[in-house]
Amino acid sequence: MQMSPFEFITIFCSLIVGLAVTHIFRAVTDLYEIRERVKTYWLNSLWVVTVTNWAIFTWWGLWLLSVDLETWSYWQYWLIVINLGSIYFFTTLVLPKATEEGEIDLEKHYYSVHNAFFSIVAFSLFSSSAVNHLLFGQAISSPLVIMPSIVGLAALYGAFNKSKKYHQFIGVFMFLMFIVFQLTDNLSIVYEG
């Protein structure tokens, strides 16, 4: 039995998303093991939940490619890999590595990586707009193209803004946005064997 184009493409895509989720789970576990030396920060914890949801929800949404695309080109594959790669990269930045000694301050970590983190988040959102338009056939005026672009601009602003109030706003906003996306998702995966 020959593999379908979707199956072939999603093997590598699943690896990328799987590594992102694994990285987050491992980082949380490592920091929990040394919790007496970890100074928590609610905003950082919120981002951990958000990026975990983001990775899981992205993988779920890839199923639509099995329905919408029967033929794949290299540029389509590359667009998906770039988008998923950006998700992996920001998941690696959201938490620091557990160290052998000394206190780990998650607020300090958050603000020390916010430039790179939000630049990659913005890139991921812009590439999501491109995926939604070019692969899923969403019109440029559709919410699935416009909204990630608008939120991408807000994330890009967060990369260069050091205001704690802005970061608290964008953190809560992004978390709520992903909750709404998940609650309004009506995708059903049905086995047709």
Image (cartoon, rainbow, N blue to C red):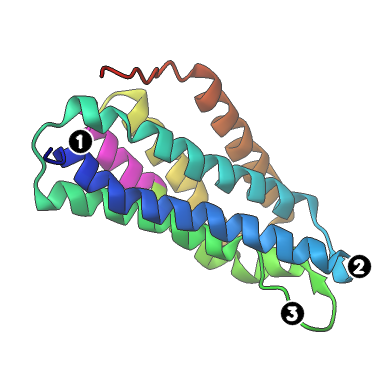
Which residue, given by chain and number where applicable, does mark 2 sit on? 36
Viewer-nearest of discs 1 and 3? 3
At label 2, counting other C-alpha atoms closer than 10 Å, the crowd grade (few under 14, some 14-19, many 20 or more) is few
Which residue, given by chain and number where applicable, does mark 3 sit on? 99
Height in image: 156 above or below 150? below
- Type of amino acid at the residue the image marks with label 2: Glu
Magenta region, residue range: 125-139
- Type of amino acid at the residue the image marks with label 3: Thr
Q: Magenta includes 78?
A: no
Q: Quadrant of residue 72?
A: top left
Disc with the residue nearer the chain's start (3 vs 2): 2
Write the residue at 42% across / 33% down: 60
Disc with the residue nearer the chain's start (1 vs 3): 3
Horizontal side of 176 relative to 103 (left or right) equals left
**Residue found farthest to the right:** 36
The quadrant of the picture occupied by the N terminus is top left
- Type of amino acid at the residue the image marks with label 1: Leu
The CA span between labels 3 and 2 is 12 Å
Residue 22, x across and y down, in percent? 55, 56
The CA span between labels 1 and 3 is 42 Å
Q: Magenta includes 131?
A: yes
